[in-house]
Amino acid sequence: MKKNSVASELISLKISTNRISWGEMGAKEKFSQKLDILFLIGERELHSPKDIMRELVMAKSNVALICNGLCSSGYIVKRNSGKNKKEIGYYITKVGTQYLNNRLEEIENMLGDIPVDALKKVNDKLWGVN
């Protein structure tokens, strides 16, 4: 495989973005997954555990564990969803929104000189892949 191929750069980018999203807590805390879930709830407005599981390709138990931690930290709340009382949804709190915005701003300050259109083009293409 060529060193500067799209595939090798993409895998390298994934590894790098994992490092960025760990923040001050480090990998031991699985902070990358916490930030991913907080982003999906706050920015993409995915509230259902099933939707979060599908987007992150995670087991139900792992999503529940991380979401329980986010609830304990006050970043999200768990509520019954809609008509079916058995279905739950996760919703971001003011504290969670503030924390997410701070983390997004940190990342923006670190990488803000990269053209957003280029990232959006790659992201749009990857979201279309099953």
Image (spheres, rainbow, N blue to C red):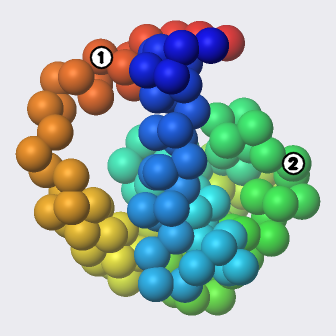
Q: For this view, does 27 lie left or right of residue 98?
A: right
Q: Amino acid at mark 1?
A: Lys
Visible residue check, residue 101: no
24 versus 59 height, above or below: below
Q: Residue at x 71, y 79 (%)?
A: 28
Q: Residue at x 27, y 61 (%)?
A: 107
Residue placed under numbered mark 2 in the picture: 59
Image quarter (top left, top right, bottom left or bottom right) of the N terminus: top right
Visible residue check, residue 105: yes
Q: For this view, does 26 lie left or right of residue 16?
A: right
- Location of residue 29 in the rendering, given as x and y in whole percent from the top left corner: 68, 79
Q: Residue at x 51, y 62 (%)?
A: 19
Indicate the secondary structure of the residue bearing disc 1: helix
Residue placed under numbered mark 1 in the picture: 121
Indicate the secondary structure of the residue bearing disc 2: loop
Q: Amino acid at mark 2?
A: Ala
Among the 4 quarters of the image, the one containing residue 63? bottom right
Mark nearer the N terminus (2 vs 1): 2
- Location of residue 13 in the rendering, given as x and y in whole percent from the top left corner: 46, 39
47 versus 56 height, above or below: below
